[in-house]
Amino acid sequence: MGYVLPWRHTANALEAVLAGRTDTLAVFDELGASDARSVFSALYQITARTGKSRLTRDACLRDALKWRNIILSTGEVPIGTKIAEDHGRLHYAGQQVRVLDLPADAGSGVGIFDASALQSEPGEVADRLKAAAARYYGVAGPEFVRRLLAEGPDEVGSLVGEMITIFEKNQIPPGANGQVRRAARLLGLIGAAGELATRWGIVPWQEGAAIDAAGKALADWIAQRGGLGAAEIRDGIEQVRGYFAQFGESRFDDVGNADARIATTRAGWRRGWGEDREWLILPSVWRNEICKGRDATAIARALAEQGKLVRDSQGKHQRSERTPMGSMRVYVLKASILRTEDDER
């Protein structure tokens, strides 16, 4: 097996490979060519850092394999898009923060390259990089480890910790969720390692370039995920918005028009028009269909805080409303759910 790994492994094989590469980089080949179900399982297994407990032939408990790796994978599609190929499976927040989706674009119009640093065509630069990687493969990593041991792991560890703290202070926007801070800590670690490699003469980069690149990666990741809040709430609200964009008319009876078409699969009722439109949603539909796979209570709380869900007089998320089937406890959602954050700015 080469150094670059395929995504498809049995659980036992993946544990052994990761344990054999602990405290190093685990590189996986093209994400888009892999099986969606294998990727979903592998993400949790890789980031769990410990294998399954197993018994020996004489029924004694065998020591579980352990590992600690930073992983890198290329891909033409984001991880969430790949996972969704498995019958619409959800990409959960825990996976999003364990493996960061980072666009491979320097932002200067030539892909991963910085246009200001190019002295020839991007294709020629790519060819030179490929040739250099083949020639110097296995040089920088071992030299970095040798310098780390020579400088003293404790001293280097303290320095890296300080660099990460400064990175977090400078790069994390106010009000950021803990998930953003976790991503910043990982990218700060990578940036700090790059700065050490520069100081030790292992790479020919300018001082500060690695930290700057880590800062750009964090900003790109925040922009791609859609903001600073908790991913599970943001994704849940987007799921609710998508449901009403698709079924807001067809699955809700009009309470003000007795002659209107009756929904064959009723999720509740609707009243009003335009900005005054409200949906009265049956609690079971809210939990089991609209918020399927999500924390329905947390999503209702977030929408109420945004003024898109109407609380009752006691602050509860469900309220008593008159419907064609009598007075019922329902969720009342406003038409503003269809507006995104960009629409409201």
Image (cartoon, grey):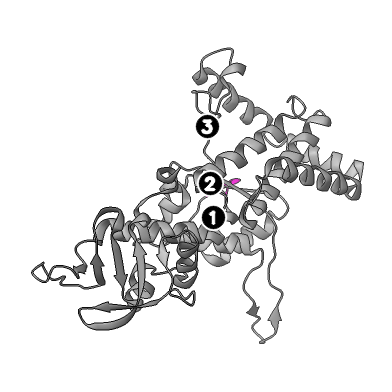
Q: Tell me if residue 340 comes above or below residue 109 in the rendering.
A: below
Instruction: Name the foreground residue: 325 vs 262.
Output: 325
Mark number displayed over residue 96 = 1
Q: Are marks 3 and 1 in contact (CB under 8 Å)?
A: no
Is residue 336 at least partly visible in the picture? Answer: yes
Kind of element beneath mark 3: loop
Mark 1, other Cα within 10 Å: few <14 / some 14–19 / many ≥20: some
Q: Which residue is mark 2?
A: 101
Q: Position of residue 325 (x, y in %)?
A: 21, 82
Bounds of the magenta segment: 1-5
Inter-mark Cα distance, 1 to 2: 7 Å
Give the residue at x 36% y 77%: 283
Q: Are marks 1 and 2 in contact (CB under 8 Å)?
A: yes
| Main secondary structure along the magenta-highlighted residues | loop
Is residue 92 at least partly visible in the picture? Answer: no
Kind of element beneath mark 2: loop
